Image: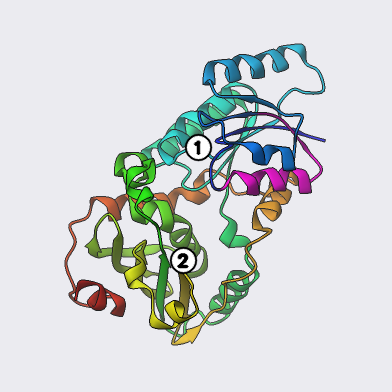
C-alpha cells in the first residue's frame, strides 16, 4: 500500500483523486487547502491529517519522511489552481515523493524543461493526468486513424460548451495569469487528445479569443480541426437547451459523431492504476498540449476568416 498526500483538497477535481487513491487500495495520509470546506475527505479518508497552511503541511510531510515509518508519503497528488502546479510539483519531488498532477501540468512550455531537471536531480517522477488518452472511444478512434493513414487528412470539428456562472470570472479561473485562460483551463486535455489521435501539430490559428469563448483551427499530421470552446450558456445548441443540459461536448470526424460523452467516471482511477504499474504519462507527453495552449493565449485572433468553426458565426452575431 502506498501513501499519498493531496494539495487542493477543496477543489472540484479533488474527489476524483480521493476516489482513485481509495479504489487502488492506497491511503491518503495528509491533505492541504487554504479553504477548509473539505468535508468530502470523510467519505474517503477520515483519518487523513488536514492543513490550511502550507508551512505546517510541509513540516508534517518532512517529519513523516525523517521518521521513515509506514506513513512516509510516496506520492503527492496536485489539484491546486493551475498557476501553482509548477511550484507544487517541485515541492513534491523535493520532499522525496513522485508527483501526480492535474491538467494543465504547467502554464508555459519552458516550465516543462525545469521539471525535467528537478526529476533528474531528485530521482523522482512527475506523472500527468491525461485521462482522455484512456477513454475507450478515443483509443478506438486513434487505432482507426492509424489504420487509415495515407488516405488523406480527416476533417474534424471539436465543440465543448460548459456553462459557468458569474462566480467563474471572480475566481482564479477567470484570471488568465492564474488559469491560463479559457483554452488552457477547459481545453488543454482536448488538445492533448487531438495530438494523441492525429499526430504532430503543424498549424495553429486562432479566430476568436475572449474570457468566455475561444475558437480556432489546428492542423495535425492526419487531421484538420475546427474547434470551439465556451463557458457561455448562450452558445449551447437548441437541442441541449431543450433537454435542460448546461454542457455540450461533441467531436465529429469526417461528419461522423464520435460518442465520448460517457465513460469518464473512472478515468482517474484508471490513470492511477497505470501510474502505480509504472505506465503513466510523464512530463514530455504534456509538451505539445502545453505549447498549443500557450500559442493560443498569445496569438492575435484573425476573426471569422478562412476555415472557422460554424458556431463562431452564431456567437459573433
Numbered-mark total: 2
* Left or right placement of residue 278 versus residue 295 in this view: right
The quarter of the picture where residue 233 lies is bottom left
Where does the image place residue 97, in percent across and percent down from the top left? 65, 28
28, above or below 245, in the image: above
Where does the image place residue 217, in percent across and percent down from the top left? 30, 69
Real-space CA distance between mark 1 and mark 2, rounded to the nearest whole angstrom: 25 Å
Give SS at disc 1: loop
Q: Which of labels 1 and 2 is toward the front? A: 1
Mark closer to the chain start, 1 or 2: 1
Q: Which mark is residue 80?
A: 1
Where does the image place residue 284, in percent across and percent down from the top left? 50, 46
Residue at horizontal 57%, vertical 73%? Answer: 260
* Left or right placement of residue 209 versus residue 164 in this view: left
Q: Which mark is residue 29?
A: none
* Left or right placement of residue 54 versus residue 76 in this view: left
308, above or below 151, in the image: above
* The N terminus: image quadrant: top right
The one of 128 and 144 positioned closer to us in this rendering: 128
The quarter of the picture where residue 218 lies is bottom left
Q: Which mark is residue 194?
A: 2
Magenta part of the protein: which range? 13-30
* Left or right placement of residue 295 versus residue 160 in this view: left
Any part of residue 307 in sight: no
168, above or below 223, in the image: above
Residue at horizontal 76%, vertical 44%? Answer: 22
Give SS at disc 2: helix
* The C terminus: image quadrant: bottom left
Amino acid at each position: 500500500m502506498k501513501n499519498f498526500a493531496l494539495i487542493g483538497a477543496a477543489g472540484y477535481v479533488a474527489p476524483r483523486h480521493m476516489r482513485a487513491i481509495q479504489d487502488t487500495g492506497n491511503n491518503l495520509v495528509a491533505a492541504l487547502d487554504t479553504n477548509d470546506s473539505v468535508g468530502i475527505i470523510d467519505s474517503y479518508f477520515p483519518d487523513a491529517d488536514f492543513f490550511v497552511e502550507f508551512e505546517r503541511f510541509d513540516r508534517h510531510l518532512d517529519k513523516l519522511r525523517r521518521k521513515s515509518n509506514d506513513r512516509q508519503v510516496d506520492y503527492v497528488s496536485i489539484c491546486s489552481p493551475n498557476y501553482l502546479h509548477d511550484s507544487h510539483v517541485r515541492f513534491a519531488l523535493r520532499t522525496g515523493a513522485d508527483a501526480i498532477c492535474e491538467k494543465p501540468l504547467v502554464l508555459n512550455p519552458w516550465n516543462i524543461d525545469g521539471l525535467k531537471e528537478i526529476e533528474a536531480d531528485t530521482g523522482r517522477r512527475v506523472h500527468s493526468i491525461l485521462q482522455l488518452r484512456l477513454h475507450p472511444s478515443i483509443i478506438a478512434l486513434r487505432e482507426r486513424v492509424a489504420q487509415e493513414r495515407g488516405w488523406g487528412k480527416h476533417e474534424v470539428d471539436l465543440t465543448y460548451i460548459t456553462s459557468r456562472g458569474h462566480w467563474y470570472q471572480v475566481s482564479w479561473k477567470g484570471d488568465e495569469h492564474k488559469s491560463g485562460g479559457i483554452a488552457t483551463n477547459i481545453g488543454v486535455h482536448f488538445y492533448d487528445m487531438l495530438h494523441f489521435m492525429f499526430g504532430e501539430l503543424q498549424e495553429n490559428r486562432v479566430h476568436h479569443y475572449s474570457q468566455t469563448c475561444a475558437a480556432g483551427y489546428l492542423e495535425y499530421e492526419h487531421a484538420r480541426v475546427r474547434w470551439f470552446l465556451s463557458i457561455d450558456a448562450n452558445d449551447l445548441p437548441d437541442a441541449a437547451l431543450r433537454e435542460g443540459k448546461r454542457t455540450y461536448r461533441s467531436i465529429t470526424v469526417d461528419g461522423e459523431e464520435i460518442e465520448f460523452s460517457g465513460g469518464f467516471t473512472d478515468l482517474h482511477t484508471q490513470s492511477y492504476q497505470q501510474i502505480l504499474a509504472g505506465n503513466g504519462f510523464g512530463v514530455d507527453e504534456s509538451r505539445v498540449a502545453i505549447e498549443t495552449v500557450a500559442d493560443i493565449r498569445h496569438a492575435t485572433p484573425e476573426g471569422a476568416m478562412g476555415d472557422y468553426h460554424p458556431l463562431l458565426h452564431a456567437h459573433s452575431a
